[in-house]
């Protein structure tokens, strides 16, 4: 039987939003919305409206690494150099699947922008602000919710910064 909105992971996301005064409308699909492309198809949105939640880590001597969550527009990729500059740390790296799960409390493909197991620093791609509504994961690889980018920023306590790779002109024209 497929997961429903009653799943504990989805409920944690809904509760985190409620604590900040926001009611979310979560949709749980029978098929996966694990990738940005799958999510865009499932909700009938542009790829750019899909929020990818990508986990990076900053190593800490004698402690667990610090998690950094990047909220990135669907077609974009995080530029590690830009992210390092935003964080003021050159030793940032992508988290493994196990680290992402341990640090956020969610599996890859379902990591929401907020409501994590512990405090997570969040950096948001400014390209998400181009849309009136974006779609983010709601705790499971099959659950998503629509949200205005400004509300998403508030819920995630995100710092908006240019962290995406520069797209080549040919890529931009092909996407148009």
Image (cartoon, grey):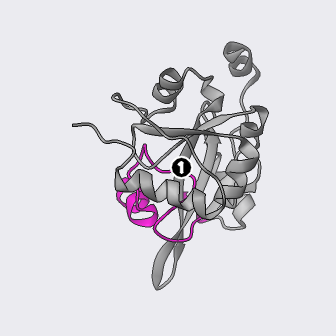
Query: Which residues are the magenta region?
Result: 91-120
- Taking 60 as reference, is 32 above or below it? above
Q: Nearer the viewer, residue 120 or 142?
A: 142
Q: Is residue 102 magenta?
A: yes
Quadrant, the C terminus: top right
- The picture quadrant where one finds residue 159 is bottom right
Q: Is residue 6 above or below residue 91?
A: above
- Identity of the residue drawn at 57% across and 46% down: 24
Q: Residue 124's x, y, as percent?
A: 69, 50
Measuring from the top left, give residue 167's x and y in whole percent: 71, 30
For image coordinates 51% across by 60% down, the residue present is 15
Whole-percent x and y of residue 128? 71, 38
Please indicate whether residue 15 sits to the left or right of residue 152 in the image: left
| Residue at position x 55%, y 61% in the image | 16
136 sits to left or right of 108: right
Q: Quadrant of residue 69?
A: bottom right
Q: Is residue 62 left or right of residue 145?
A: left
Asked if the magenta segment contains residue 100, the reply would be yes
Q: On the image, numbered disc 1 is attached to which residue?
A: 54
Viewer-side residue, 150 vs 72 = 150
Quarter of the N terminus within the rendering: top left
For label 1, the crowd category at 10 Å Cα-Cα, with few meaning under 14, some 14 to 19 and many 20 or more, is many
């Amino acid at each position: 039987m497929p997961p429903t909105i009653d799943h504990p992971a989805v409920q944690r996301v809904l509760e985190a939003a409620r604590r900040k005064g926001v009611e979310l409308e979560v949709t749980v699909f029978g098929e996966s919305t694990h990738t940005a492309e799958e999510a865009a198809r499932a909700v009938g949105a542009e790829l750019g409206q899909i929020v990818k939640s990508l986990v990076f880590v900053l190593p800490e001597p004698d402690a667990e690494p610090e998690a950094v969550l990047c909220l990135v527009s669907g077609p974009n990729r995080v530029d590690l150099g830009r992210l390092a500059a935003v964080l003021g740390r050159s030793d940032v790296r992508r988290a493994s699947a196990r680290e992402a799960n341990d640090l956020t409390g969610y599996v890859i493909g379902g990591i929401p922008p907020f409501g994590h197991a512990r405090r997570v620093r969040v950096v948001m791609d400014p390209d998400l602000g181009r849309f009136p509504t974006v779609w983010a994961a709601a705790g499971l690889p099959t659950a998503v919710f629509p949200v205005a980018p400004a509300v998403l920023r508030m819920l995630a306590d995100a710092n908006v910064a240019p962290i995406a790779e520069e797209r080549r002109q040919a890529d931009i024209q092909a996407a148009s």
